[in-house]
């Protein structure tokens, strides 16, 4: 091993890469050290002290998450002194923790709970004393904050600031009064939060959680006057399985559809269909703008976290946003128009549920200015993957045991292009597959032509030749990356024709509504890549891989919209945006 | 200790804003100057209300929450304006053991404000401070720098009355 150092851990000799932390070195040889505040590439502050280890010659215990190894270092990860220190840390955290573990939404996925169990904490109240009371902040549409369960690890603060360049939450006051929140005690709903939910998936405890809309869905399902339909976003099929013990990246479409039917939905549809519809509209929009050279670059509008970010922080780019509703919105729109008409149901009796890998979709669902049917929301309830899993468990459905089922017509078909919407670069690739054929009039035979936009890198660029016309594209995920791209466009340093932006790093596969992945996994595995691989496999195995070849999409244009970009399509499938303040 | 956020309306002047803008212009390319800018801003306005922190946030291109985090961490920053008469009660060791707390309580009772606050009419503000070096006169407090020593709670109404009209 080049650039390796020789170290001893718990008396055994190892060779590990120079520059690694004690935590990484120990993990590489099969020794796990617990963490709470550490989150790879996001938060490395050595603050919580749960990862302390003994290092021979060191004055005191050191934090393994940030302490680098060096030649000849002797480390002890499991001595009585270390175990005692970790236990004390846990007991101290518990002394100011609201211990309602039986009912907590994170029971079972709480990192604090798991450690208390592993370290055999016997007395939850070993240190009793002052307890600071906080009101639960429910001001935001998509989530709530319960600071009585906060352990001050600052993972949410770091992800909001570094990954998303939003920074609406931080540590305020000091000492015992330290708490996470927004400036001047504003609620999250009153600041320029973009609703991405990355703070929720970063949170080790139940301090942050999505607004639970499951009861609303159960109520609709139990209402005989309602015709309840559901759509599932592309990335849901590759996330949901984790809630039921499947390996990360497993696509569980069939069982998911089956479970939804068992829950009692009157129609179980695929958002991939709506994603294909989005491509038809967006590719048409792009080609029109490209021809006129107007409002370029065109920027995608599928990610509601990104859309809200644009409205708050880059209002100058609102004119560049695609006017297409997101696939969620498009589905709701056609459910309440085309579908209502076809089925002969009054749109007000149709209740549309979306299952999304996303918390910002809850916010998007409440934008009703451009509803397809005036006075009715396009979407009646938008739930996350975690909420759907809770519904399935509550209904007593044994997910692993049920057979596969197929989506229902007329929105049951989705192309491979629709599937890859769930990963960064996917919307771009899907749009290019269609735009290529429209522009060149030739068949795209090599589906790997636009491979350069795949992958988890934060910013990707490519130039493609469409029959003599060069199209420059960029793809960004994570809003700090999007910010970089937008600044380059603003300064004139870069010129793009088409930009795809997704708020969450890696795209929807890593969305704020996906199953919680504990830091013990996130610190060593790339969740984004593992889940995306599932979607790209799905794409490769589907019979139809281009949006314009989706038979359901063709049918809806034939029967209802006429052609992409038609007046009717504009009325129903397109939307508008609002400039919002930062302060 | 949690800082009190003033509810007294902000009434900064264009002159004050010009001064702060000049400070920001000088420092905006170096974010590590944030504390300095905040100190200057407090010097100009007497405190750091939301309006002033937003000016700094926009001028320095630093999120408001980060500025607020700093403002609530360091004892030197105030979120409440200073009154026309700024009362500062010493809580140094000598004053404390000689009975500074009853004095604070009495002032609070008369003025209807807690330490860290300012009266709604902007006349009085109250704060606690560390040793001012007048231990021989303990317990002491100052009003706009004028020292009152060897005070008991009973002396407080008479002293405040001098400033009331």
Image (cartoon, coloured by chain):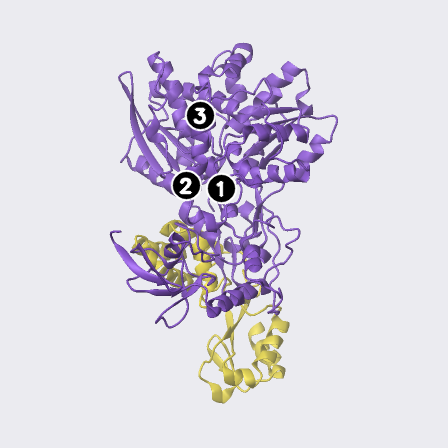
Chain colours: A purple, B yellow
State the residue in front, A512 or A368. A512
Q: Residue furthest front?
A: A12
Query: x%, y% of residue A302?
Result: 47, 30
Residue A300 visible in the snapshot: no
Q: Is residue A401 above or below residue A289?
A: below
Q: Element at badge 2? A: helix
Residue A539, disc: 3
Q: Residues within 10 Å of mark 3 (few under 14, many from 20)?
A: many
The residue at 68%/15% (across/down) is A344
In this image, B68 relative to A455: left or right?
right
Q: Circle 2 sits on which residue?
A: A479
Find the distance from the CA under tag 3 to the CA under tag 1: 30 Å
State which mark lies toward you, 1 or 2.
2
In this image, A213 relative to B3: left or right?
right
Q: Element at badge 1? A: loop
Mark 3 or mark 1: whose residue is earlier in sequence: 1
In the picture, the quarter occupied by the C terminus of chain B is: bottom right
Subunit bearing disc 1: A
Find the distance from the CA under tag 2 to the CA under tag 3: 26 Å
Mark 1 or mark 2: whose residue is earlier in sequence: 1
């Amino acid at each position: 091993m080049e650039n390796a150092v020789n170290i001893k851990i718990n008396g055994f000799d190892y060779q590990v890469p120079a520059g690694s932390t004690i935590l990484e070195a120990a993990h590489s040889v099969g020794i796990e050290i617990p963490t709470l505040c550490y989150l790879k590439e996001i938060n490395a502050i050595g603050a919580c002290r749960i990862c302390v280890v003994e290092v021979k010659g060191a004055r005191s215990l050191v934090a393994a998450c940030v302490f680098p190894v060096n030649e000849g270092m002797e480390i002890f990860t499991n001595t009585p002194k270390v175990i005692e220190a970790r236990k004390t840390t846990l007991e101290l955290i518990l002394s100011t923790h609201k211990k309602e573990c039986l009912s907590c939404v994170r029971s079972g996925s709480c990192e604090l709970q798991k450690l208390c169990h592993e370290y055999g904490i016997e007395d939850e109240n070993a240190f009793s004393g002052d307890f600071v009371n906080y009101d639960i902040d429910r001001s935001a549409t998509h989530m709530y904050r319960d600071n009585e369960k906060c352990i001050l690890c600052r993972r949410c603060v770091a992800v909001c600031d570094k990954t998303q360049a939003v920074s609406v939450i931080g540590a305020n006051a000091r000492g015992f009064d330290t708490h996470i929140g927004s400036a001047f005690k504003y609620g999250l709903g009153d600041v320029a939060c973009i609703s991405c939910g990355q703070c929720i998936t970063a949170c080790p405890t139940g301090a942050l959680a999505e607004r639970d809309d499951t009861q609303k869905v159960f109520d609709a399902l139990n209402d005989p006057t309602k015709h309840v339909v559901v759509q599932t976003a592309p990335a849901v099929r590759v996330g949901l399985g984790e809630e039921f013990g499947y390996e990360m990246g497993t696509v569980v479409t069939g069982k998911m559809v089956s479970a939804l039917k068992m829950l009692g939905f009157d129609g179980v549809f695929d958002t991939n269909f709506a994603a294909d519809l989005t491509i038809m509209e967006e590719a048409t929009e792009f080609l029109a703008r490209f021809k006129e050279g107007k409002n370029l670059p065109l920027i995608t509008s599928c990610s509601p976290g990104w859309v809200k970010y644009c409205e708050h922080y880059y209002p100058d780019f609102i004119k560049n946003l695609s006017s297409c509703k997101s696939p969620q919105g498009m589905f709701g729109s056609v459910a309440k128009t085309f579908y209502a008409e076809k089925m002969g149901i009054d749109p007000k009796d149709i209740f549309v549920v979306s299952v999304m890998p996303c918390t910002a979709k809850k916010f998007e669902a409440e934008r009703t200015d451009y509803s397809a049917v005036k006075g009715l929301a396009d979407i009646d309830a938008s739930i996350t993957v975690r909420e759907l899993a809770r519904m399935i468990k509550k209904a007593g459905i044994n997910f692993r045991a049920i057979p596969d089922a197929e989506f229902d017509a007329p929105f049951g078909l989705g192309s491979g292009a629709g599937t890859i919407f769930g990963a960064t670069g996917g919307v771009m690739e899907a749009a290019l597959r269609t735009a290529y054929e429209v522009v060149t009039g030739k068949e795209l035979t090599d589906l790997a032509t636009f491979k350069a936009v795949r992958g988890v890198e934060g910013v990707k660029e490519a130039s493609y030749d469409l029959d003599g016309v060069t199209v420059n594209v960029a793809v960004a995920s994570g809003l700090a990356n999007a910010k970089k791209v937008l600044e380059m466009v603003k300064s004139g340093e870069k010129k793009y024709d088409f930009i795809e932006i997704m708020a969450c790093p890696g795209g929807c596969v890593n969305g704020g509504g996906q199953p919680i992945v504990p830091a013990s996994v996130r610190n060593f595995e790339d969740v984004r890549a593992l889940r995306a691989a599932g979607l790209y496999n799905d794409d490769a195995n589907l019979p139809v891989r281009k949006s314009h070849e989706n038979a359901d999409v063709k049918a809806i244009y034939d029967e209802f919209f006429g052609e992409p970009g038609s007046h009717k399509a504009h009325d129903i499938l397109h939307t508008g945006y609002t400039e919002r303040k930062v302060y | 200790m949690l800082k009190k956020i003033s509810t007294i309306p902000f009434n900064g002047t264009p002159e004050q804003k010009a001064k702060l803008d000049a400070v920001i212009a000088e420092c905006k390319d170096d974010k590590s100057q944030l504390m300095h800018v905040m100190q200057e801003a407090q010097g100009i306005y007497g405190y750091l209300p939301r309006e002033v922190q937003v000016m700094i946030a926009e001028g320095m291109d630093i999120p408001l929450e980060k500025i607020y985090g700093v403002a609530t961490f360091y004892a030197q920053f105030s979120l409440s304006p200073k009154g026309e008469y700024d009362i500062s009660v010493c809580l140094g060791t000598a004053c404390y053991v000689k009975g500074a707390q009853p004095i604070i309580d009495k002032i609070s009772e008369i003025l209807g404000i807690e330490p860290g606050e300012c009266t709604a009419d902007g006349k009085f503000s109250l704060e606690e401070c560390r040793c001012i070096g007048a231990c021989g006169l303990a317990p002491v407090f100052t009003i706009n720098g004028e020292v009152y020593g060897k005070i008991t709670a009973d002396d407080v109404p008479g002293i405040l009355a001098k400033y009331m009209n």
